[in-house]
Image (cartoon, rainbow, N blue to C red):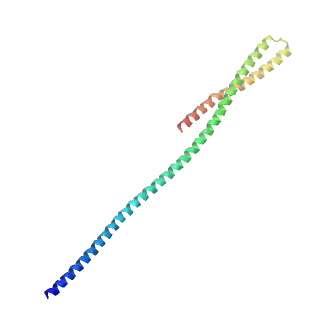
């Protein structure tokens, strides 16, 4: 009976060793699964962060496109204002030339004969010169406004 019990004990010990070995295998597999679950959670977090960054980059790209459009519009506006400035400078030169012509007409009026027909002709020339001078004055009055618009556009462009 002792030998039978010893044989049973040995068989039980063998089963216990087998069960212990199986338990170790199952524990190792469970550890690996837990590690994999942690990695999956980390990857999900990284994926969420990447999605947020992608959305943020999309928003930034939209802002860049809008800023480029505004910059182009400001550039176009500046070109227009530069044309106005050039035209204003041309008008200033014309105004100076007209003033010289007006003085010349005045000098000629003093030197010309006083006959009635001559006086009528000279008065007509003077009226024409005065009309031109009035038109010149009207154009010169526009120059400060155009200069102010040009300055405002340049300032606006500098801010962009």
* Residue 83 at x, y percent in the picture: 66, 33
Q: Which residue is rendered at x = 53% and y = 50% of the image?
A: 62
Q: Is residue 46 left or right of residue 80?
A: left
Q: Nearer the viewer, residue 32 or 96?
A: 32
Q: Does the rendering let one see residue 137?
A: no
In which quadrant of the rendered view does residue 87 lie?
top right
Q: Nearer the viewer, residue 113 or 160?
A: 160
Q: Nearer the viewer, residue 49 or 147?
A: 49
Number of marks in the rendered image: 0
Q: Which residue is at a point 61% across and 32% down the rendered structure image?
A: 150
Viewport quadrant of the C terminus: top right
Image location of residue 34, percent across then percent down:
33, 66
Which residue is at 65% across, 28% downward? 143
Q: Position of residue 111 (x, y in %)?
A: 80, 11
Please identify the quadrant where the N terminus is shown. bottom left
Q: Is residue 92 above or below residue 18?
A: above
Counting from the top left corner in percent of width and height, residue 137 is at: 69, 25
Residue plotted at (80% across, 18% down): 123
* Relative horizontal placement of residue 144, taking residue 55 as reference (left or right): right
């Amino acid at each position: 009976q002792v030998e039978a019990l010893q044989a049973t004990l040995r068989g039980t010990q063998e089963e216990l060793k087998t069960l212990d070995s199986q338990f170790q295998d199952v524990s190792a597999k469970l550890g690996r699964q837990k590690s994999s679950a942690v990695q999956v959670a980390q990857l999900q977090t990284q994926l969420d962060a990447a999605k947020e960054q992608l959305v943020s980059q999309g928003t930034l790209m939209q802002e860049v496109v809008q800023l480029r459009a505004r910059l182009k519009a400001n550039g176009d506006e500046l070109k227009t204002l530069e044309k106005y400035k050039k035209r204003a400078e041309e008008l200033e030169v014309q105004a100076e030339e007209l003033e010289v012509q007006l003085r010349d007409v005045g000098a000629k009026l003093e030197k010309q004969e006083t006959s009635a027909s001559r006086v009528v002709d000279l008065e007509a020339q003077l009226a024409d010169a005065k009309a031109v001078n009035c038109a010149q004055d009207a154009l010169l009055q526009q120059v400060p406004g155009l200069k102010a618009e040009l300055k405002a556009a340049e300032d606006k462009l500098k801010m962009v």
